[in-house]
Amino acid sequence: MNKPVIIHPCDESTDFLEAITTLLIKQFGAEHFHYHRIGFHAGSHRECVEFVSSLPDETFVFFMGHGRSDALLGAFSDDFPRELLVTKEQASVFHRKKVFLLACRSEELLREQGISGIGFGNLLTDMGEVNQARELRQNWNAYYNVQPNDIARFRSILVSIVGKSIAKFFIKQMTLEQLHLLLKLHFNKAISKLILSGIPSQNQGLANLLYEAKSQMRLFM
C-alpha cells in the first residue's frame, strides 16, 4: 500500500478531530503517513493540493475539516480568512485515489465531480451549525432535542468510529466498500447502545445526530 495521506486544516472548530490522527500515529507510527496540517498561509494550501496531485493511483487520502458541496475548506482563524483548499475545479486531484472526506456535504462534491470515495452530508459538530441547519430548514423546532452536551458526545463518538474504522482498514488491507460497511456497522452499534441504555429520551438527540451522519454517508465507486 502507498503511504496514506492525512489532511487537516488548522481550525479551532475542528481541533477535536486531531484525536483521530493521534490514534493512528500511536498505533502505526508517524512514519506510516504523510501528514499535512494546513497552516495559516496560502502556500501551505497550494503545496498540499500539488502534493495530492502528484500521488500514485490508489493512494488513500483522508481529509478532515469543513466542506461544502463545491469545495473543501482550508485553514481559518480570527486573523486568517477562510480559504478554499480544493475547489470543484481542482477536485480532479482526487481521481484514481482512495478518498475519505470527513466533511459536511462532501458526498455532494464526490458525486458531482465523479470521484470515487466516501463522503458525508450533514455533520453537525457545534451548536452554531445546528442553528444554521434550523435556519436553512426554516424550522426552529428542527433538532429540538439536541443540546450542547449531545454535541460534545457526538464529537467523541465520531472520532472513535472513524479512528478505529480506518485503523482496521489498514490492518486488514480492506477495500473502500469494506470500510464503508464497517463505518455503518459502528454507527449502528453506537445508536443501538444509546437507545437501549439509560433513559431513551435523554439520548434521542444524540442518536438522531448519529443516524443522520450514517444515513447521509455515501460511497462512490
Image (spheres, grey):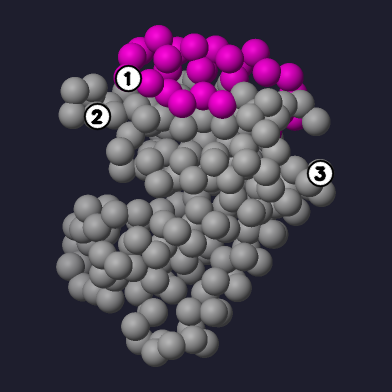
Report the residue at 60% width, 73% height from top: 189
Q: Which mark is drawn over residue 71?
A: none
Q: Is residue 152 magenta?
A: no
Residue under pointer 2? 77
Q: Are marks 1 and 2 in contact (CB under 8 Å)?
A: yes
Residue 20 visible within the image? yes
* Quadrant in which the C terminus appears: top right
Q: Is residue 53 magenta?
A: yes
Measured as percent of width and height from the top left, residue 27 is found at 67, 43
Report the residue at 41% width, 62% height from top: 154
The magenta region covers: 35-60
Q: Dot 1: within a 10 Å radius of its alpha carbon, few (fewer than 14), some, or many (20 or more) residues?
A: many
SS of the residue at dot 2? loop
Residue 65 sits above or below residue 51 on the image = below
SS of the residue at dot 3? loop
Q: Nearer the viewer, residue 198 or 49?
A: 198
